[in-house]
Amino acid sequence: MSLEIVGPSLGAQPQIRELPLRGITAETDSPRPVITIAAAQADGEQITHVIHAPTEVQIEQTNEGADVALQIRSGDGTASILRFRTQTMADSVDGMPRPV
């Protein structure tokens, strides 16, 4: 997965590049909701990105229905775009995905 932050004053800023996704959590019951994206680094550590005051979440899919991106907008006008690495038929052997 890769993560890019886009905003009017920022432009497009890459934050995470081609790391395994560990998870996404949403804490929406608190007075200050947050969404946290976690990725695994090569050394076994974790890198996180926190989105404060999320206002909108959208999923982008291929025509086949595969999820390719998740866009999360926040109250300050920025968007966090999480791009998934998708597998194609060329990435599979006998219908089974190849290890990545």
Image (tube, grey):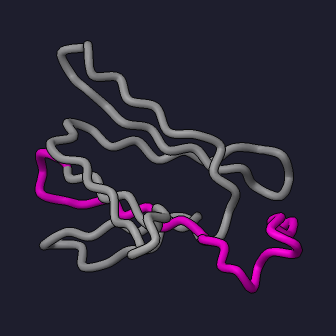
Q: As displayed, is residue 9 above or below residue 30?
A: below
Q: Is residue 96 magenta?
A: yes
Give x and y (percent) for residue 83.
Answer: 48, 67
The N terminus, quarter of image? bottom right
Residue 7 image position (x, y, % from top left): 20, 69
User: With 40 as the anchor, is 56 left or right in this view?
Assistant: left
Vertical arrangement, residue 25 with respect to residue 73, above or below: above
Tell me what residue is drawn at x 69 percent, y 44 percent. 46
Q: Quadrant of residue 32?
A: top left
Q: Quadrant of the C terminus?
A: bottom right
Q: Which one is in front, 70 or 89?
A: 89
Q: What segment is highlighted magenta in the picture?
A: 74-100
Residue at (69% x, 56% y) in the render: 20
Foreground pick, 87 / 54 = 87
Lateral position of residue 73 relative to residue 93, left or right: left
Q: Is residue 9 above or below residue 56?
A: below
Left or right: 91 in relation to 38: right
- Residue 93 position by quadrant: bottom right
Looking at the image, which residue sits at the far front? 94
Locate residue 42: give its quadrant.
bottom right
Q: Count the marks: how many? A: 0
- Rendering coords of residue 61 (x, y %): 38, 67
In the displayed structure image, the side of residue 27 where residue 66 appears, left or right: right
Name the residue located 31 percent from the left edge and 59 percent from the top edge.
71
**Residue at position x 65%, y 43% from top?**
22
- Seen as rendered, the residue at the extreme bottom is 90
Asked if residue 51 is among those painted magenta in the image, a careful observer would answer no
* Residue 39 x, y percent position in the rendering: 63, 50
